[in-house]
Image: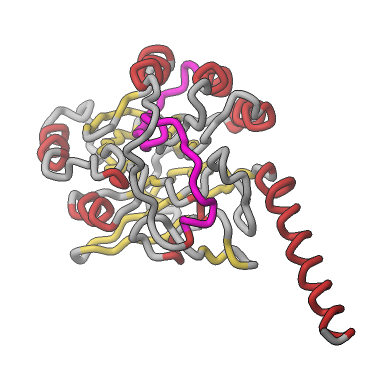
Amino acid sequence: MSTPAKAAAAVTFGVAAAAAVYAIAIERRAYRVRTEVVPVLAPGAEPIRVLHLSDLHLAPWQRDRIDWVRSLISLKPDIIVSTGDLLGHREALPALTEALMPFDGVPGVYVHGSNDYFAPTFKNPLRYLIGPSSGDPDVEPLDIDALERLLGDRLGWHGLNNDVGQRIINDSTLDFVGVNDAHRGWDRLDVVPALLDDLREQDHDDSDDPAITIGVTHAPYRRVLDSFTTQGADLIFAGHTHGGQVCLPGGRALVTNCDLPAEQARGLSLWYHAHRAAYLNVSAGLGHSIYAPVRFACPPEAVLVTLVGDDIGYA
């Protein structure tokens, strides 16, 4: 190899090594809060601050993540939306309890991802670049009942795994519809539309303003987004994609680990289906598998989505 070629190879190796160190040691801990404003409430309605948490993949030793999540109470959310994969280790529940305790007393809704049911297993960390991951039959079940007790009984959050629920926040009625993890095929889109119809038939606190419909899913598969949009969802929350996790410089996702278009792997966008549109907020999530501790051009995030009256306009 010639001297110029050796020099070029050395530079290439140095750049790759620096990028790897940054992705492993720095960016995966560079937590941030993304803020969005969505005009879906009735004109003149009091704003609603929604804190969207997703994909913590928490392990007991991740002290920085626990402390950072706890600090989010300073955002003074009116309601929490959790889109799953909170657990990332067989012994993560005490750590998750500590992380979420500041939100005791704050209303919330949640769905699960498959990592809430099963402990992670080692896989080739670059396997996700080939295509969506598949379920591993040889997995260790987690204590999903204990997680339900934490979220449902202790925090008082409402589970939306193939279910619906209603919350009145700041005098606005929010109708929620959710599904269990679509990545595992656990979504019951044959069931939830009728449940939502039944919910809408209930008395909405005698309010003259129509309820806002919010869809919640872990994995943003097209079939789920299409169904929610057909059902009249104004806004949809999702996680699962990790924003691509390892992206091109500038943040362009290479994959989404589902059939969502790469350009919608994270952030706020519009989802169109059957002559309707819904706002879609996909969180890049806060964590990663303990076997793939890396992020590049895709920092971990929580999202504060402020719902405002539709007379204010999109910001």
Q: Is residue 314 visible?
A: no
Q: Residue at x 73, y 60 (%)?
A: 19
User: Within the magenta stretch, is there residue 121?
Assistant: yes
Whole-percent x and y of residue 194?
A: 10, 39
Residue 173 lies in the magenta stretch: no
In this rendering, the answer to whether 283 lies above or below 91 is below
Residue drawn at point x = 39 percent, y = 51 percent: 133
The residue closer to the viewer here, 256 or 120, is 120
Q: Residue furthest right?
A: 3
Write the residue at 22% across / 32% down: 163
> Can residue 124 be seen from the camera position used here?
yes
The residue positioned 18% from the left and 41% from the top of the image is 188
Depth order, front residue of 19/50: 19
Task: Decide if residue 9 is on the left or right side of residue 287.
Answer: right
Q: Which residue is farthest front?
A: 1
Query: Which residue is more in the foreground, 305 or 216?
Result: 216
Question: Colour scheme of this structure image?
Answer: secondary structure
> Total label count?
0
The rendered magenta stretch, by its main secondary structure, is classed as loop
Residue 180 in picture, x, y percent from top left: 28, 37
Of 21 and 169, nearer the camera is 21
Q: Which region shows up in magenta?
A: 104-128
- Whether 256 is drawn above or below 238: the answer is below
Q: Is residue 57 above or below residue 33?
A: above
Dividing the picture into quadrants, the one containing residue 193 is top left
Is residue 297 toward the left or the right of residue 37 in the image? right
Q: Quarter of the image containing the N terminus?
A: bottom right
